[in-house]
Each structure stands twice: as C-alpha cells, then as structure tokens.
C-alpha cells in the first residue's frame, strides 16, 4: 500500500491533521494556516507524482480522497466549535461524503474503483482555500458566509455529479428474490 512516494505523501497529509488542530486550538492561526496549506498542497503533489511516474494505485485512489476528507472535516469541526460555521453545514458535507463513500463501496463490489471526479477535486480545492480564509479572516462574518456558500454549492453539485455519472453501479444492486423451499 505504501510502496510508492505518492502514497507516502498522502499519508503525510493525514499525519499533519493533528498538528494543524493543535496549532489552531492554541490560537496560533498563522502556524495552523501554514500546516493546513502544506497538508493541502500534498494533495497536488501526490497526484502529480502518481500520474507523472505512473504510480497510480487502487490504494492511492482510495487513500487520497479519504485524506482530503479527514483534513477538511477536521478543520470544519474546528470552525463549528468556534462558532464560525453552523453545524448543519458540516452535516450536509458529511452526508455527501457518506453517500459518495457508499457509492464507491457498491462499485467495489462490482470490481470497479471510482476515482475522484473533477467536480470533487474542484470542491476540495474550493473548500481548502475557503477554510484558509476562515482561519485567517474568520472575524469578518461576511467571509465566513461566502465560504460557507461556496462549500455548500460545490458539495451538492459534486455529490450529484458522482451519482449521475455512476448510476450504472446500482443496476442489479437490488436484492435477489429468495426461492421458497
């Protein structure tokens, strides 16, 4: 699973999450921002290296979006606790993530891996950039509201796109009737 550099970089993103949170809770927001940005940029780096050196793996396809979710959701939990984001926004993001993960699990049963779609990558990028703004400029409520709106629109849009493009995984997914004995 971790035999290549891109997957190790993805793991680094996960390791940086608690570092980010400790710094954020200590009110060292500029330091937390630096760690969050560094962790976010590993998403670009691991993807670039995986494509450039033909090291795309199923483990990487699974771990990369999971690491993104862990980083983003950790930051969103911080902002909910600090009162910069309502909990229902986090709930919508979580519901989308669980739904897409469920879709991926159904696909795996059919020996198919659903890689991150462009809309999902766009959503992640917008969310990561927005969370950076909230971290630094969160005392301005209008910035929080703008970021929340962007997160909601991109979350709903990308979630809908995953399901529309992959509806075929639900074919033959209904339970088969049991024969009476």
Image: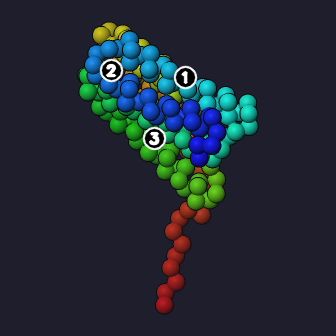
Which residue is pictured at 46% across the width and 34% down the height?
14
Circle 2 — which element? Answer: helix
Q: Position of residue 67 (x, y in %)?
A: 49, 36
Circle 1 — which element? Answer: helix
Residue that protrudes farthest toward the front in the picture: 3
Measure the alpha-carbon separation of dots 2 and 3: 24 Å
Q: Is residue 77 above or below residue 177?
A: above
Q: Quadrant of residue 31?
A: top left
Which residue is pictured at 64% across the width and 53% down the height?
112
Q: Is residue 2 above or below residue 48?
A: below
Which residue is pictured at 51% across the width and 24% down the height?
40
Query: Quick one: label 1 or label 3, which is nearer the N terminus?
Result: 1
Which residue is pictured at 41% across the width and 16% down the height?
33
The reply to whether residue 86 is visible in this rendering is no
Circle 3 — which element? Answer: helix
Q: State left or right for residue 40 relative to residue 18.
A: right
Q: Position of residue 110 (x, y in %)?
A: 62, 59
Query: Quick one: label 1 or label 2, which is nearer the N terminus?
Result: 2
Q: State left or right for residue 43 relative to residue 97.
A: right
- Residue linked to disc 2: 24
Q: Is residue 139 above or below residue 85?
A: above
Q: Which colour style is shown?
A: rainbow
Foreground of the two, 130 or 146: 130
Q: Position of residue 105 (x, y in %)?
A: 53, 53
Mark 1, mark 3: which one is toward the viewer?
A: 1
Query: Quick one: label 2 or label 3, which is nearer the N terminus?
Result: 2
- Residue linked to disc 1: 41
- Residue linked to disc 3: 97
Q: State left or right for residue 74 relative to residue 68.
A: left
Foreground of the two, 159 or 16: 16
């Amino acid at each position: 699973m971790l035999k290549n550099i891109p997957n190790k970089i993805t793991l680094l993103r996960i390791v940086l999450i608690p570092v980010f949170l400790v710094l954020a809770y200590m009110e060292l927001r500029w330091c937390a921002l630096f760690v969050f940005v560094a962790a976010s940029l590993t998403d670009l780096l691991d993807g670039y290296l995986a494509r450039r050196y033909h090291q795309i793996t199923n483990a990487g396809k699974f771990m990369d979006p999971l690491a993104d979710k862990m980083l983003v959701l950790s930051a969103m939990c911080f902002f909910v606790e600090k009162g910069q984001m309502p909990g229902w926004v986090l709930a919508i993001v979580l519901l989308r993530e669980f739904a897409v993960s469920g879709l991926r699990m159904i696909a795996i049963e059919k020996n198919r891996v659903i890689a991150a779609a462009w809309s999902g990558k766009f959503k992640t990028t917008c969310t990561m950039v927005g969370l950076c703004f909230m971290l630094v400029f969160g005392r301005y409520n209008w910035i929080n509201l703008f970021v929340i709106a962007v997160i909601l629109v991109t979350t709903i849009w990308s979630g809908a796109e995953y399901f529309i493009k992959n509806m075929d995984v639900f074919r033959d997914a209904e339970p088969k009737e049991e024969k009476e004995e």
